[in-house]
Image: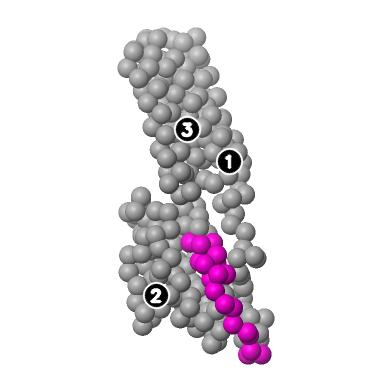
């Protein structure tokens, strides 16, 4: 298991052009330039919204007119990148880099350049060839899991009421499962809203509202849950709406 995500891409531009474009590219959304070294053509990127994340980008000159861009995104304190944040970060920065490079004059490739391009094992990309998956991926599995957790949170309390017995271990177990399902469900609804696909964001918002309704329903027993049920959707949906607008 590893929290590292790597990606190698060959671009048909000189290394100096790629390096200059890269360091002047930032900030890209929450990703900011942390360090750079012109001697080694290396760049370090950090996420201002997640201090557990770090990305190293190294450039390697393959020929005078071609450059290998090596991305390594990592969560050093984690065993595995569960949410795919590293892959998402790489694709976001790569998309911006290719778009900026596309604005520059592309050199005419020599025969040696063309031979390197044909033999490389890495992807050879430009802004026209690259399709960022974050714009199209629907996260279907995560959406389904989110709705299943919603269903559990509705069904389990009803079962608990029907089977209620004081000091029952079964009722206690069902209560623990409900709390866990609720917690994971809220996290998943937030993750869905952090994406770019409009349908996925919509499902995330629906799930957030459903979990908020659960708390409001629990307010029949304690009024504090009504306040929590209102705050959860307002905070989560409001945060991601504001965040998305800041990128536009």
Q: Is residue 181 visible?
A: no
- Residue shown at 40%/70% (left/top)? 23
The residue carrying pointer 2 sits among few (fewer than 14), some (14 to 19) or many (20 or more) residues within 10 Å by Cα, namely: some
In the rendered image of this protein, does residue 171 appear above or below residue 90? above
In the rendered image of this protein, does residue 142 appear above or below residue 181? below
- Residue shown at 66%/90% (left/top)? 111
Q: Could you tell me residue 217's position as x and y percent?
A: 44, 14
Q: Nearer the viewer, residue 132 or 14?
A: 14
Q: Could you tell me residue 74's position as x and y percent?
A: 41, 60
Structural distance between the alpha carbons of marks 1 and 3: 19 Å
Residue corresponding to mark 3: 185
Residue corresponding to mark 2: 42
In the image, which disc is placed on residue 154? none
Q: Could you tell me residue 204's position as x and y percent?
A: 52, 35
Q: Element type at marker 2? A: strand
First in residue order: circle 1 vs circle 3: 3
Residue 79, image quadrant: bottom left
In the rendered image of this protein, does residue 66 appear above or below residue 177? below
Please say if the residues under marks 1 and 2 sit with CB atoms less than 8 Å apart.
Answer: no
- Residue shown at 52%/82% (left/top)? 14
- Write the start and end of the magenta stretch as one range: 93-112
First in residue order: circle 1 vs circle 2: 2
Residue corresponding to mark 1: 198
Q: Is residue 203 magenta?
A: no
The residue carrying pointer 1 sits among few (fewer than 14), some (14 to 19) or many (20 or more) residues within 10 Å by Cα, namely: some
Q: Is residue 169 left or right of residue 138?
A: left
Q: Could you tell me residue 163's position as x and y percent?
A: 48, 11
First in residue order: circle 3 vs circle 2: 2
- Residue shown at 61%/48% (left/top)? 137
């Amino acid at each position: 298991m590893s929290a590292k995500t790597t990606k190698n891409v060959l671009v048909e531009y000189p290394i100096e052009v790629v390096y200059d474009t890269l360091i002047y590219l930032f900030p890209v959304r929450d990703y900011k330039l942390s360090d750079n070294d012109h001697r080694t053509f290396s760049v370090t990127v950090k996420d201002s919204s997640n201090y557990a994340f770090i990305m190293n980008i190294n450039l390697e000159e393959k020929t005078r007119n071609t450059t290998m861009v090596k991305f390594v995104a990592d969560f050093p304190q984690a065993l595995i990148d569960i949410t795919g944040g590293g892959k998402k970060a790489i694709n976001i920065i790569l998309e911006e880099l290719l778009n900026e490079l596309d604005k520059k004059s592309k050199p005419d490739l020599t025969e040696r350049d063309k031979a390197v391009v044909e033999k490389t094992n890495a992807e050879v990309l430009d802004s026209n060839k690259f399709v960022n998956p974050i714009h199209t991926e629907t996260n279907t599995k995560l959406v389904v899991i989110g709705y299943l957790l919603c269903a559990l949170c509705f069904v389990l309390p009803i079962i608990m009421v029907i089977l209620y017995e004081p000091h029952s271990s079964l009722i206690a177990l069902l209560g623990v499962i409900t709390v866990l399902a609720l917690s994971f469900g809220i996290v998943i609804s937030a993750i869905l809203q952090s994406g770019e696909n409009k349908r996925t964001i919509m499902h995330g918002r629906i799930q957030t509202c459903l979990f908020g309704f659960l708390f409001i329903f629990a307010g029949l027993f304690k009024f504090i849950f009504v306040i929590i049920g209102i705050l959860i959707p307002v905070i989560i949906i409001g945060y991601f709406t504001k965040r998305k607008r800041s990128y536009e």
